[in-house]
Amino acid sequence: MATDETAVKSTESSENYLKTILILSKHLPVVRSVDIANEMGFKKSSVSIGMKNLRTKGHITVTDAGFIYLTESGKQIAESIYEKNRFMSEMLVAWGVDPVTAERDACRIEHVISAETFEAFKNHCKKN
């Protein structure tokens, strides 16, 4: 049985892969495992395992040619994580945090912040 920490790391890893696929798909005509590996600095074998897990969960499809596409569920997760990342990163930079540190911290925050708290952050910022 997986521990809570293992489950969280697994979810975080999956979310990072999905976010990376989303970002790459905005810049590349097709996304392949090698593109993800290069972007994330991972070995292709590690990415292959991650893609298998995402495929099993129904978050991606992979063509015979190795092209990776987000399914509707994968796209929803990726867009949610990416929105949190961009918002938190921009907020931290606006508060005076170095952009590199802000991006690194936003990448951590995006996985643990609840939808309720994130909405509260956005609403508070809209008012100010």
Image (spheres, rainbow, N blue to C red):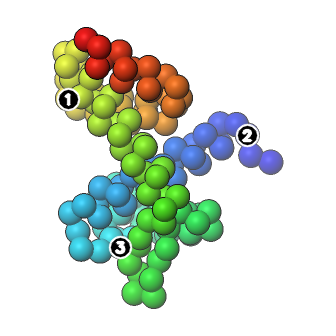
Task: Residue 15 in the image: state x and y as whole percent.
Answer: 48, 49
Q: Amino acid at mark 1?
A: Pro
Gap between marks 1 and 2, in whole Å? 33 Å
Gap between marks 3 and 2, in whole Å? 31 Å
Please report whichever mark, 1 or 2, sits nearer to the chain's N-terminal start.
2
Image point (38%, 35%), residue name: 84
Q: Which residue is mark 3?
A: 32
Query: Neighbour class for label 2 at 10 Å: few (<14), some, many (≥20)?
Result: few
Query: Neighbour class for label 1 at 10 Å: few (<14), some, many (≥20)?
Result: some
Q: Amino acid at mark 3?
A: Arg
Query: Neighbour class for label 3 at 10 Å: few (<14), some, many (≥20)?
Result: some
Outermost residue toward the right in this view? 1
Outermost residue toward the top in this view? 128
Image point (37%, 20%), residue name: 123
Q: Is residue 18 shown above or below 2?
A: below
Outermost residue toward the bottom in this view? 64
Please report whichever mark, 3 or 2, sits nearer to the chain's N-terminal start.
2
Quarter of the picture holding the C terminus: top left
Which residue occupies the foreground of this view, 26 or 33? 26
Q: Which residue is mark 1?
A: 99
Please report whichever mark, 1 or 3, sits nearer to the chain's N-terminal start.
3
Q: Which residue is mark 2?
A: 3
Which residue occupies the foreground of this view, 63 or 98? 63
